[in-house]
Image (cartoon, rainbow, N blue to C red):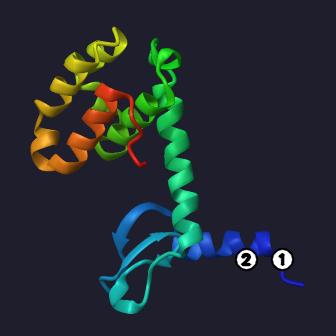
Amino acid sequence: MINRERLRGGLVDDEREVLHAYQDHLGFWTIGVGRLIDKRRGGGITHDESMFLLDNDIDEVLTALEHLPYWCDLDATRQEALCNMAFQLGVAGLLNFKNTLAAVARQDWDAAYAGALNSKWAQQTPARALRVATALRDGDSLWD
């Protein structure tokens, strides 16, 4: 029977592990330990792998946002709205919405709505921003 740990170690040695997309020696997009993701060569990931990555990303965002002092005071819809913003903008990007987050902290939903829409983010992705801002203001689900 194959020694999976030895095989893994050898492949890491030969392929190297790169934790971001890079172009291999032939110019094809690759990630991890020699994982071809370049569509031109039939690469990609499976749905299950995509959902695994998404779940990890959601966990990372939730862990970061749980440190906001008012996080536990928010209903699920408004937590989801902030997670949605953090997923698109990164947590650091969301934290730059100082006026919007201050409005969220004091539960001034009209100001949170206005602050979210008065942003470069809202100009870049207007439909998504309007949907998220409306969820912040009204407390209605983003996805129902």
Q: Distance between the residues labelled 1 and 2?
A: 6 Å
* Labels 1 & 2 near each other (Cβ < 8 A): yes
Q: Taking 135 as reference, is 64 left or right? A: right
Q: Where is residue 128 in the image (x, y as percent from the top left)?
A: 24, 48
- The residue nearer to you, when weighing 57 against 110, is 110
Q: Which residue is drawn at 38% across and 29% down?
A: 139
Label 1: how many Cα within 10 Å (few below 14, some 14–19, many 20+): few
- Locate the N terminus and report the quarter of the image it occupies: bottom right
Q: Where is residue 129 in the image (x, y as percent from the top left)?
A: 22, 42
Q: What residue type is labelled 1?
A: Asn
From the image, tell me which residue sits under label 1: 3
Residue 63 lies, with reference to residue 89, above or below; the image says above
- The residue nearer to you, when weighing 32 against 10, is 32
Q: Which amino acid does label 2 sit on?
A: Leu
Q: Residue at x 50, y 15 (%)?
A: 73
Q: Which residue is drawn at 9% across and 44% down?
A: 123
Residue 61 lies, with reference to residue 37, above or below; the image says above
Q: Which residue lies furthest to the bottom in this view?
A: 41
Specify the quadrant of the image occupied by residue 2: bottom right
Q: Where is residue 35 in the image (x, y as percent from the top left)?
A: 50, 76
In the rendering, which numbered label is found on residue 7? 2
Q: Where is residue 28 in the image (x, y as percent from the top left)?
A: 34, 82
Residue 78 lies, with reference to residue 57, above or below; the image says above
Specify the quadrant of the image occupied by residue 20: bottom left
Q: Taking 64 as reference, is 123 left or right? A: left
Label 2: how many Cα within 10 Å (few below 14, some 14–19, many 20+): few
Q: Residue furthest right?
A: 1
All told, the count of numbered labels is 2
> Tag 1's secondary structure?
loop
> Tag 2's secondary structure?
helix
